[in-house]
């Protein structure tokens, strides 16, 4: 159980690029990073494309005026001059800028925490991975839902064989907030539905990568062998970017899966749902009730496992923050994600490769796999929804 | 609201072939047919392949000894000799016998009510349809879940445009009762997993046809243009019959759909789930809580509609039996199905084609469409899960 | 598992007094009695205070014209003249008529099935009990919710000690259909809110007796030692009859309980909820999802037991009709109630007191206990909500 | 919507008394206070009765060694010597110490944030209130569940008349963690079940005060006129402190209420449930799914309101942190509570009585009312569960 005590010698000096007042995602990053004030301290930022607004915002967060910068290049340059300069930077800007900012940060010797989807192409991912490796730096990717303890309960149950052999993987992340057209779309919505700024996908990248990554945490031993993607643009102006998509998958152990992502699932507030079916039992989890896990053994009464309870696996309980009966929310999950990345950075700084070998955190490989999966989805969909081998 | 008052001049003289003591389905037919004793009276039967057992069973149901027969041929022959002979016969036998028994009954001038999946091939369906038409007889098909009033509420809401244009059709009927192998399978389970007795499919035919038919009731204006089916036999001895299958569909209005059927969804008691997503709103219904309907208008709070409430559409309320706050179950649904078929038979007997033109009941077309859909699924799956045009 | 096979040598000849076209309750009685046509046959009726309407109604139910009577007295007199005269009569009329009709029927040698609350006073109950005993007749009381198999699962679990010692009994039956005033009340509503026709209570008698009786089935070994009732008439014209009431109870083993009945719980569709808390575990059941039972062992994950599953107790499974995955509704419950009463009548007719000794059915004692409980509630409430000893 | 931007000129210098490593509650305080690092900074502490352990703990939280004290008296004395001394102190120690520590802090000119139940007697509350007033200091009370935005949605809906006149108030906070005896009880459990350390109540004070306070937020216009409390000690060693209690209430507008608190509700993970019933509609909220609110208008489909949605009232949306579809948990609620108290302290420091007049936060009056309510409950219960006038 976590209680805010430090796991690093001292907090990392942390800055943000993007994530200003006008978007929603920045606060999730700060909620995650600053939870206990023992992993990160916010020391600088280039929060906003509008410098004035970003300055005002940063001052309101308690950042020193002189460390509020007009853009990421200035941030990098000026912080490099300081003895107490920033050590790790979060990139919470539109997708099309991830690659260039990440590259610049790494070249300046800064660890990076980047929003998903990471980049546009596998080639970019591999180049950045090599660069990070060369520089001895961490690239974390904020798959913010995977910090919930019960996600790791599912993984532990699968690992212990409590489900039997995995047969069926059912993944869903849908909402209806884009059921209408984009005529009154927010800024955030506009860049997400434009291939120039969003990359080759809309919902597959924006929300699909979350559930694909979470499934990998639960099923680390399975590999997709082929997949088929059928994607639609119900609002025509979004084409070729999809606002709805189905993916069918085959896994190397004979399991099959399906995944549904949508932002036109009108009226739905159910969001994410995960179901992992084995030969003996299944587990099911949703992000709307992240504190409960349904465990169904064939022939027995379904059980509802509650977070924080002693009957859970250690792999779940160690990430617990609030305790049984006390709800954890998305902020708690982000706090775990940020903590795990901080621990990775700290280990990297200490050249502790042994730690890194077994330490779980969403890093460059996770980000790269997300981009790889998107490439396969797009290739399948754009060829008429055909099966494509996964490699 | 229904209260048992007659809608036919007098009850139909009804008999059963199959549906004896050792199976579960027979009681559902009797529950449906005999609900009010104003639509059907049970007058004869060939309930069991074991004549003694069937005789004992029939006597226990109150059928006269002399009208309990060793097999369907004797039933047809002997009843034909009586002035008060049977008028309509239910066929609740294994799939492979449906065609020959139906044909024999129709040729003997009897109306037929048959279990699904109706027959093995479209050719058989068409032959029987022509025969029934020639003889002026009804063939009803017991899609027993579609008598729930809220199914018709969904249809009425779609028809009134309350969802907007339909975009997404999400269908599911899964359970886990066959997650283990068939070494201790029941008789019913054994014939269902054998292609000789079950026909070309297992779960697609056994449970998939139910949800495909229900979706047609809700979306009578949509046509599938192509589909893709991926089916598996997780228990190898069942191959080529599937115990799990995915179907993706495209509709003529641009909508897309997916369907999941499984009998290896270990531990799941959730059974059927239907979600119809329109451009403005969605409806969702399950058969495990058939008395509630979730109605979700994008941007508004989800609403839970309850059966029997005055705010529902007339199309739903007229099939109500118990009233608000009082649960209806599957038996109430079967009672409606049987009533609708009785009304069709009565109209046919009276040559009331005008009534039949608008009267809703699961007839030969519904049964035929089920078989057609299965043929397309199998063709797609057996060609590697490819898209096949639907015709 | 029940499948409609007879448990009586031949069906009872059954008639109805009240329960005509304009009310809702009559159809529940017919649904229960006529379920399989092996326990009862409907042979006569005095369905309606409006003879013409009742005649038309009875004909529509298939009753012979000459056995449709203008009132209960004629029914009794005329049926007595027939060799095939009625054997058992259901009384589904307003409360204030129960006593006189029951008495008249018993005196004529007819078994009686009566709506709850049975009578107005304990004295009436005792007089009728003595009369029934003298005449060798059964008086059944239609507590229609207690036929659900999972009610008997709870009783079996308590009996086996699966909950430990019972500590807390939480009972609720509420709805909001009378949240508004009675200016547009239905006939049924009007007599229920008038002390002349309803007796000393409204919701306590109308719905509270149901949950009190169900709790007795689950906890046959407990006795209330004292209770306190606080009742309100939120719609003033209903006073002194209550539209909302709380009851606190102490039991002889040290357990405590509370009960809430209301018809002004605005908007609620949740209806009945039962929770029985023991020293080790609890069970919780609702009538809106009668097919599931929540079983919560302290320190373990809550379990959801589903009707019809092999892990249930025999006491539950033997009353099953539809089987696992197939919903049972209120009609199935009524069918069980009516069957149990038929079995009691049959045993009484055969003088089989041994059978009657262990046979569960809602009889005169259950009806009497309901009236006794109402008397105590009223006495407590009308003295300012004070504790009254229970005797 | 809150995003971490400051609402105070600069963060308050904050210290903790109690709340060390071995308990669970301390982390909730830190989660609340340190959420954004713009309201509070943790500068000192006397975290633990074991000085070594508390020292180690404080260092791990990043507190300077010289500001980690062996006890509260030293903390007060030493911090008073510093120019940058602590301004506000949280007291998270066993109940019996609240009064003396609060008094000492106030006398030293420190604002106080104290756990509930605040003190043992009304007299203590009044003395402390007078002292705080004299010194110009705030006493906040951590009713940590009332920071959830939907609590304030309920209040706004009641205020706007969306429920009509309030009739019924249904409050519940139960769990089963003390269903077994206390032979292996934790330290925290031990002092809670001892009247010397816990005060006159166990569950009434420990959890009942939470729900009583929350009901006051929703129903600020109602006053209890009388109540009745029936309390039990199912584990005998806890007597006279109760592990289960019922409270019935009458309000000055004619409404009635009931409340159930228990720590022997075996197996229950449902925790808190609130239902407010008006003449037109009801709202229902639970702390286990704090992001949803059920709104039921009589005669219309129940609606499920989701946190963060634009259709909510401004009174709810302004306390939102995560946004629609993204779960908030108990930590988010505590963050709001601590923020509101910080704003009160800041206003007090600025002598801004106008702000304080309308500013919502759990202060000394809320704490006092909790103690008053407990006194009435105990008086009723200890006199045999009788009605006592509320004053």
Image (cartoon, coloured by chain):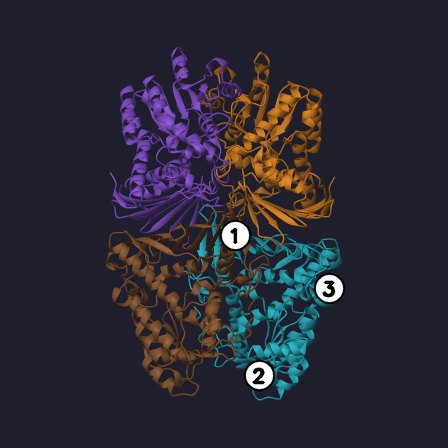
Chain colours: A brown, B purple, C orange, D cyan
Which chain hosts label 2?
D
**Residue B10 visible to the viewer:** no
Q: Position of residue C233 (x, y in %)?
A: 59, 46
Disc number lying in front (2 or 1): 1
Kindly state the secondary structure of the residue where label 2 is placed: loop
Residue tagged 3:
D194
Q: Position of residue C384 (x, y in %)?
A: 69, 48
Asked if disc 3 and disc 2 are in contact, CB closer than 8 Å, the reply is no
Q: Earlier in the sequence, mark 3 or mark 2?
A: 2
Label 3 Cα neighbours within 10 Å, binned few <14 / some 14-19 / many ≥20: some
**Residue A208 visible to the viewer:** yes
- Taking D363 as reference, is C144 above or below it? above
Label 1 Cα neighbours within 10 Å, binned few <14 / some 14-19 / many ≥20: some
Measured in 3D between alpha carbons, the distance from the residue under mark 3 to the one under mark 2, in whole angstroms, is: 36 Å
Asked if disc 1 and disc 3 are in contact, CB closer than 8 Å, the reply is no
Residue tagged 1:
A162
- Residue B287 lies left or right of residue A319; in this view the side is left
Kindly state the secondary structure of the residue where label 3 is placed: loop
């Amino acid at each position: 159980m976590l209680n805010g005590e430090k796991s690093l010698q001292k907090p990392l000096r942390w800055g943000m690029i993007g994530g200003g007042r006008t978007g929603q995602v920045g606060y999730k990053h700060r909620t995650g990073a600053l939870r206990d004030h023992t992993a990160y301290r916010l020391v600088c930022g280039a929060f906003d494309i509008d410098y004035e607004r970003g300055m005002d915002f940063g001052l309101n967060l308690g950042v020193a005026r002189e460390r509020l910068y007009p853009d990421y290049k200035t941030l990098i340059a000026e912080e490099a001059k300081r003895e107490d300069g920033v050590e790790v930077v979060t990139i919470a800007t539109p997708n099309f800028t991830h690659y260039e900012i990440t590259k610049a940060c790494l070249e300046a010797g800064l660890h990076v925490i980047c929003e998903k989807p990471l980049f546009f192409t596998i080639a970019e991912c591999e180049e950045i991975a090599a660069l990070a490796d060369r520089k001895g730096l961490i690239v974390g990717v904020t798959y913010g839902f995977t910090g919930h303890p019960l996600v790791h309960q599912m993984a532990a149950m699968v690992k212990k064989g409590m489900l039997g052999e995995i047969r069926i993987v059912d993944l869903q992340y849908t909402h209806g907030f884009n059921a209408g057209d984009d005529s009154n779309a927010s800024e955030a919505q506009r860049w997400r539905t434009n291939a120039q700024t969003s990359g080759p996908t809309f919902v597959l990248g924006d929300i699909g990568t979350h559930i694909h990554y979470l499934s990998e945490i639960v099923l680390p031993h399975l590999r997709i062998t082929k997949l088929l993607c059928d994607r639609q643009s119900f609002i025509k102006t979004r084409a070729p970017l999809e606002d709805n998509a189905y993916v069918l998958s085959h896994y190397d152990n004979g399991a099959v899966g399906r995944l549904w992502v949508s932002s036109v699932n009108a009226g739905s507030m159910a969001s994410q749902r995960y179901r992992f079916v084995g030969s003996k039992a299944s587990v099911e989890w949703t992000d709307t009730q992240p504190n409960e896990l349904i465990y169904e053994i064939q022939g027995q009464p379904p059980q509802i496992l509650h977070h924080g309870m002693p009957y859970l696996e250690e792999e779940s309980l160690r990430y617990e923050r609030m305790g049984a009966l006390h709800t954890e929310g998305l902020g708690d999950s982000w706090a775990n994600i940020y903590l795990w990345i901080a621990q990775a950075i700290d280990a990297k700084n200490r050249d502790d490769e042994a730690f890194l070998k077994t330490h779980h955190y969403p890093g460059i490989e996770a980000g790269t796999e997300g981009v790889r999966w998107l490439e396969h989805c797009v290739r399948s969909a754009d060829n008429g929804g055909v099966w494509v081998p996964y490699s």
